[in-house]
Image (cartoon, grey):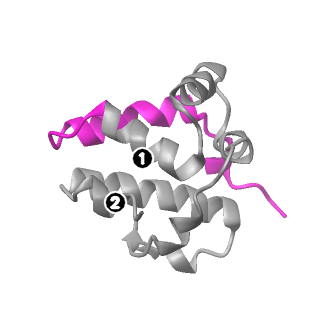
Amino acid sequence: MAVHKVFLMKFSKIYPLYVQKAEGKNRTKAEVDQIICWLTGYDRKGLEDQIASENDFKTFFDQAPDFHPNSVLIRGVVCGVRVEEVEDPLMRKMRYLDKLIDELAKGKAMEKILRD
């Protein structure tokens, strides 16, 4: 099966875009980091190490210490695609992250975003 090009994109190149999107809507880098850490199980140092290592998205998610079990509660549309209907597990994880960052940028409360 062919590998999606997006899987090969460096997380370190996309991460600043997540931060920029959030900050453009008066949210913070710390909130972006909190979302990423909640979803993947990375701690702050682990996240910083992933960014510094310039791993691609596939590696970033493959090395995630503990993908949050409540991620299955993430529902909705990102780029015209319902995240809960994405069949490829890696693509679904990427869409989950996109959806959470969208919710942050739209002003949703962190308690709702994190689904705890």
Name the quarter where the N terminus is drawn.
bottom right
| SS assignment at label 2 | helix
Q: Nearer the viewer, residue 20 or 42?
A: 42
Q: Is residue 18 visible?
A: no
Which residue appears at 52% of the width and 52% of the height? 39
Q: Earlier in the sequence, mark 1 or mark 2?
A: 1
Q: Nearer the viewer, residue 19 or 33?
A: 33
| Amino acid type assigned to the residue bearing label 1 in the image | Ile
Which residue appears at 54% of the width and 23% of the height? 48
Question: Within the magenta stretch, is there residue 28?
Answer: yes
Q: CA distance from mark 1 to mark 2?
A: 8 Å
Specify start and end residues of the magenta stretch as a single range: 1-29
Horizontal side of residue 30 vs 8, given as left or right: left
Residue 49 horizontal/vertical position (percent):
61, 22
Horizontal side of residue 28 vs 88, given as left or right: left
Residue 42 sits above or below residue 93 on the image: above
The residue identified by callout 1 is 35
Residue 30 horizontal/vertical position (percent):
33, 32
Q: Kindly indicate the quadrant of the structure image that contains residue 43.
A: top right
Name the quarter where the C terminus is drawn.
bottom left
Q: Kindly indicate the quadrant of the structure image that contains residue 28.
A: top left
Question: Within the magenta stretch, is there residue 102?
Answer: no
Which residue appears at 51% of the width and 30% of the height? 13
